[in-house]
Image (cartoon, rainbow, N blue to C red):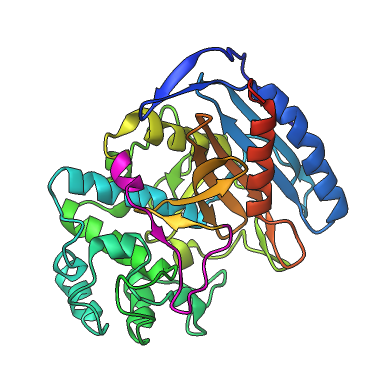
Amino acid sequence: MAWSSPTTPDVPVRWLNREVTAIDLTLVSARLAPMLEQWLAEHPTLPSAAVALLGPDGQRAVVARGLADTATGEVLTPAHSYRIASCTKPFVAATVVALAADGALDLDAPVVELVPPAVADLFARYEHASVVTVRQVLQHRSGLVDHSMFPEFNVSATTEWTPIQQLAIAVSKPALFVPGTACSYSDSGYVLLGQMIEHLTGQSLPAAVRARAGVDAVTMPSLHWEIAEDAPDGYPRAHQWFEGNDTYAWNPSFDLFGGGGLVSTLADLAQWWADWFTRVHGSIATHLADPAPTLGPDDTAFPGGDRVGLGLFSRPVGDVRIWAHGGFWGLETGYVPDLGVAFALSLTHRAPGLPGPLALAAATVGALLECRSDA
């Protein structure tokens, strides 16, 4: 299924002093649809694939192919929502940057000074706790491990997790490196930021993110924090698979406290990225300033030549640079400044041998570049 709004491809808009010309997203959709169909045909264990786009003139397009539920044969539509997993992190980072802009925190202050006492006492077990800054946690440069990578962390339909339990796993492990000297992706760091946000605002994390990160219930009606907020009607959640396992019924507490937690349609995710980059908050430049290399302690870089800003990753695709963030279940969300286009995409089975979101993002940006007026 695909849909798009009327196009006005010659309307110029501005983003951080850039001028772009809108792309006819119906043409982009026409290029992407057969590719998605081919991927599903070539990979029978891949239930569905979808891409949502939002152009600078407000034109929208969603291409959705496959099944939302293989057990019932329910067809995937643009109205289906997803657990967006780590695509939640940019929302959390945006909240932190907004708090910094309001003077509620200093990005270069030790994070241990900004969390509630119980969390500070726990985090004190980490060997670099006294010096790790908010900025380093945002950029995955704290040296803190990722709790989800250890056998103590397990997920199931019944396992109930708390943020303290997840942080306890992380602080029980040796540091990966001295803070600021390397990069290693850490869900635990964003759980820590979630605790910081709640402490500084006096609000729940979902409420604070909604208030400070531009999550608008009118323009993004499907977007909500699982369990903490009521699921809106009309946006059934698609099943998402991991290495042959249907994760639909997994207890959401395994990924609910800042590293993940949000549920959304792809169209509403694209709307958030477009809003954040173009009009919601003046601190977007802070997010993007001086992105750091993603070199690990062994000097191995993230795939794709990524650099990391404050909660957003940047990498070259074709002759443009995108800002983006991935989600564990085969999602990627992002923005292409040179084209003024926001995107969100999903492949609902993550497993070896299946296409991944980086490949779909590259194909999506490639289709956009082919359809721009100066191509």
- Quarter assignment of residue 172: bottom left
In reply to whether residue 292 is colored magenta, the answer given is yes
Q: Which residues are magenta?
A: 285-304
Tell me where residue 294 appears, x and y as whole percent: 45, 64
| Residue 189 higher or lower than 67, as above or below | below
**Residue placed at 50% from the left, 32% from the top?**
338
- Quarter assignment of residue 327: bottom right
- Between residues 144 and 22, which one lies in front from this camera angle? 22
Tell me where residue 143 appears, x and y as whole percent: 35, 76
Location of the C terminus by quadrant is top right
Location of the N terminus by quadrant is top right
| Residue 188 higher or lower than 333, as above or below | below
| Residue 165 higher or lower than 116, as above or below | below
Q: Can residue 227 be seen from the camera position used here?
A: no
Q: Viewed as shown, does residue 158 lie left or right of 99?
A: right
- Between residues 149 and 161, which one lies in front from this camera angle? 149
- Between residues 295 and 145, which one lies in front from this camera angle? 295
**Residue placed at 74% from the left, 36% from the top?**
32
